[in-house]
Image (tube, rainbow, N blue to C red):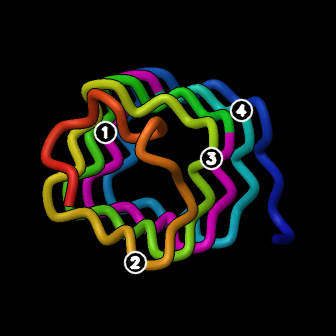
Amino acid sequence: MSIVLDGANFDGMILTGIDFSQVSLRGVSLHAANLMNADLSFANLSGANLVEADLINAKLEGAILTGANLYEADLLGADLTNARYSPEDLKGALHCP
Protein backbone atom coordinates (compact mmCIF):
# COMPACT_ATOMS: atom_id res chain seq x y z
CA MET A 1 0.00 0.00 0.00
CA SER A 2 1.63 3.21 -1.12
CA ILE A 3 -1.20 5.67 -0.50
CA VAL A 4 -2.04 6.31 3.16
CA LEU A 5 -5.18 8.20 4.16
CA ASP A 6 -5.41 6.84 7.71
CA GLY A 7 -7.78 8.77 9.96
CA ALA A 8 -9.18 10.98 7.17
CA ASN A 9 -12.77 12.25 7.36
CA PHE A 10 -14.95 11.62 4.31
CA ASP A 11 -18.32 11.84 6.11
CA GLY A 12 -21.24 12.31 3.72
CA MET A 13 -19.01 12.68 0.65
CA ILE A 14 -20.02 11.42 -2.78
CA LEU A 15 -17.20 9.07 -3.78
CA THR A 16 -19.08 7.06 -6.39
CA GLY A 17 -16.73 4.91 -8.47
CA ILE A 18 -13.58 6.11 -6.66
CA ASP A 19 -10.50 3.90 -6.84
CA PHE A 20 -9.24 3.32 -3.30
CA SER A 21 -7.75 -0.07 -4.18
CA GLN A 22 -4.72 -0.95 -2.07
CA VAL A 23 -5.06 2.31 -0.08
CA SER A 24 -4.53 2.39 3.68
CA LEU A 25 -7.74 3.81 5.16
CA ARG A 26 -7.30 2.68 8.76
CA GLY A 27 -9.64 4.50 11.12
CA VAL A 28 -11.17 6.71 8.41
CA SER A 29 -14.66 8.09 8.84
CA LEU A 30 -16.95 7.44 5.89
CA HIS A 31 -20.23 7.91 7.76
CA ALA A 32 -23.09 8.14 5.22
CA ALA A 33 -20.60 8.40 2.34
CA ASN A 34 -21.68 7.28 -1.13
CA LEU A 35 -19.18 4.63 -2.26
CA MET A 36 -21.42 3.02 -4.86
CA ASN A 37 -19.31 1.12 -7.44
CA ALA A 38 -16.10 2.12 -5.60
CA ASP A 39 -13.01 -0.06 -5.87
CA LEU A 40 -11.77 -0.82 -2.36
CA SER A 41 -9.99 -4.02 -3.33
CA PHE A 42 -7.19 -4.90 -0.90
CA ALA A 43 -7.73 -1.61 0.98
CA ASN A 44 -7.08 -1.56 4.72
CA LEU A 45 -10.30 -0.31 6.32
CA SER A 46 -9.57 -1.64 9.80
CA GLY A 47 -11.35 0.41 12.44
CA ALA A 48 -13.14 2.51 9.80
CA ASN A 49 -16.52 4.15 10.47
CA LEU A 50 -18.74 3.03 7.58
CA VAL A 51 -22.06 3.60 9.38
CA GLU A 52 -24.83 4.20 6.82
CA ALA A 53 -22.30 4.15 3.95
CA ASP A 54 -23.61 3.23 0.51
CA LEU A 55 -21.39 0.37 -0.66
CA ILE A 56 -23.74 -0.92 -3.36
CA ASN A 57 -21.73 -2.90 -5.94
CA ALA A 58 -18.45 -1.88 -4.26
CA LYS A 59 -15.40 -4.06 -4.84
CA LEU A 60 -14.08 -5.10 -1.43
CA GLU A 61 -12.12 -8.13 -2.58
CA GLY A 62 -9.30 -8.82 -0.15
CA ALA A 63 -10.13 -5.71 1.91
CA ILE A 64 -9.35 -5.65 5.62
CA LEU A 65 -12.53 -4.75 7.52
CA THR A 66 -11.44 -5.92 10.97
CA GLY A 67 -12.96 -3.67 13.62
CA ALA A 68 -14.84 -1.57 11.06
CA ASN A 69 -18.34 -0.35 11.93
CA LEU A 70 -20.72 -1.18 9.07
CA TYR A 71 -23.99 -0.61 10.94
CA GLU A 72 -26.71 0.12 8.35
CA ALA A 73 -24.12 0.21 5.55
CA ASP A 74 -25.70 -1.04 2.31
CA LEU A 75 -23.66 -3.92 0.87
CA LEU A 76 -26.09 -4.88 -1.91
CA GLY A 77 -24.02 -6.50 -4.67
CA ALA A 78 -20.72 -5.80 -2.88
CA ASP A 79 -17.87 -8.24 -3.59
CA LEU A 80 -16.36 -9.39 -0.28
CA THR A 81 -14.34 -12.25 -1.77
CA ASN A 82 -11.39 -13.00 0.52
CA ALA A 83 -12.11 -9.87 2.60
CA ARG A 84 -11.02 -10.10 6.23
CA TYR A 85 -13.81 -9.48 8.73
CA SER A 86 -15.68 -11.18 11.54
CA PRO A 87 -19.44 -11.62 11.79
CA GLU A 88 -19.36 -8.87 14.45
CA ASP A 89 -17.85 -6.42 11.91
CA LEU A 90 -20.91 -6.86 9.66
CA LYS A 91 -23.43 -6.63 12.51
CA GLY A 92 -26.31 -4.40 11.43
CA ALA A 93 -25.13 -4.09 7.81
CA LEU A 94 -27.82 -4.23 5.14
CA HIS A 95 -27.90 -6.75 2.29
CA CYS A 96 -24.83 -8.70 3.40
CA PRO A 97 -23.69 -11.02 0.62
Give the residue at mark 1. 34
Q: Amino acid at mark 2?
A: Thr
* Circle 3: element type: loop
Which label number is shown at residue 27? 4
Camera-nearest label, 1 or 4:
4
Gap between marks 3 and 1 measured at Cα: 21 Å
Give the residue at mark 3. 66
Q: Amino acid at mark 4?
A: Gly
User: Is 36 within the magenta?
Assistant: yes
Q: Earlier in the sequence, mark 2 or mark 3?
A: 3
Which label number is shown at residue 81? 2
Residue 90 is situated, as x and y percent measured from the top left of the image, at 38, 40
Q: Which residues are magenta?
A: 31-46
Along the line of sight, which residue is nearer the eye, 96 or 16? 96
Q: Earlier in the sequence, mark 4 or mark 2?
A: 4
Task: Quarter of the image for the C terminus: give it.
Answer: bottom left
Side of 20 relative to 5 (left or right): left
